[in-house]
Each structure stands twice: as C-alpha cells, then as structure tokens.
Amino acid sequence: MTLSLLQQQIINSYQKGFPVCSRPYQVVATALNSTEDDVISAIKDLKDKNILSRLGPVFCHKKAGASTLAAIAVPPAQLDKVAGIVNQFEQVNHNYAREHEYNLWFVVTANDAVALEYTLMEIELLTGLPVLVLPMEAAYHIDLGFNIDFQQSKMKEH
C-alpha cells in the first residue's frame, strides 16, 4: 500500500499534538506546506483504507466525567447476544471478549458517578447478569506514538 508524502507527514507529525482550534486542518496544512482541502482528503483516504482508526482527543477521563472498566460472566452460548445488548449503550466502548470466567469486558463512561451507576444498573437489568465493576485505582500512561520510517517499511515489503 502506498501512502502519499502528505499522508506520511500527517501520520508522523500528528499522532499527538493535533491542533485544537477552529480550523485544525488549516493549521496542519500550513505546517506541512499543503492546503486544508488536501489535508482533509488525505485524512479521509487514510480512514477509508483503515489505516487511521480514530482522530480525536485523549484526555483524563476523571476530569471530564466518570468511567470504569466492567466485566460480565456470560454463558458462552449467550456471549454475542449479551455483547449486542451492552453495545446498545452509547456510554460503552472497548467491548471485547476474553478467555476468563468474566468473558465480556467493556469500559463505561458517563457525565458523572450517578449517571455511570445508572448505566451499569441498566446493563444488569437488560442482560439479567451482574456486572463486575473495576474502577481504576492508578493511571498509567502508555505513549503509543511512533515515528514511522516509510522508506524502511517499503523495503521490507519486497
């Protein structure tokens, strides 16, 4: 898969520190000697090719509301059905199956602790299963930004 120079620059320059302003794509375009339309088009193409999964902020959730990791022990035959119920909640993300007694894990976010508790109670009511609540005790930051050597990457393809 070939990426344009602009796409390569966007990937290496904006894995973090994306401008937060009224015209962020214009700021990126100016920094990369391009146009706002070209930057938007390049990002859309990265998204269409499933190279870019998400463009959005990462922030301290405790300062913006409440969240928790949660798990449910689901009978294996009901896993897809229960996952579908859990996925109906817009407050749920990172829903995934695990090989464990508690085999369905997900993160729930809400505006505040009361709304979080209400959502967890609704999930229990609709699934008919108790939810194990695993609130975060300590935050760990993993920097997942990587400078990609696209020339080196291309050489390994051949």
Image: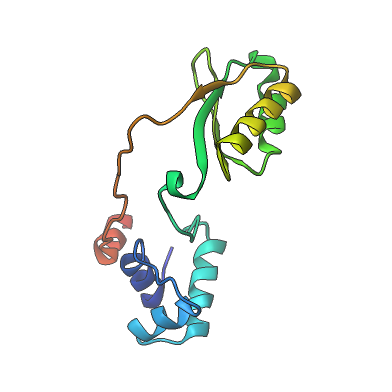
Q: Is residue 32 visible?
A: no
Between 30 and 123, which is closer to the camera in this rendering? 123
Give percent across and percent down for residue 89. 68, 39
Q: Which residue is drawn at 49% across and 80% down?
A: 23
In percent of width and height, residue 156 lies at: 28, 55
Quadrant of res 1: bottom left
Horizontal side of residue 94 vs 128, given as left or right: left
Position of residue 71 relative to residue 149, above or below, is above
Residue 84 vertical position relative to residue 125 in the rendered view, above or below: below
Residue 7 left/right relative to 151:
right
Residue in the image at 45% along x and 87% along y:
35
Measuring 29% from the left and 59% from the top, which residue is drawn there? 153
Residue found at the far right of this picture: 126
Q: Residue at x 59, y 15 (%)?
A: 73
| Whether residue 19 is visible | yes
61 to the left or right of 155 = right
Could you tell me which quadrant the C terminus lies in?
bottom left
Across and down, in percent, residue 31 comes to 33, 82
Nearer-the-camera pick, 137 or 49: 137
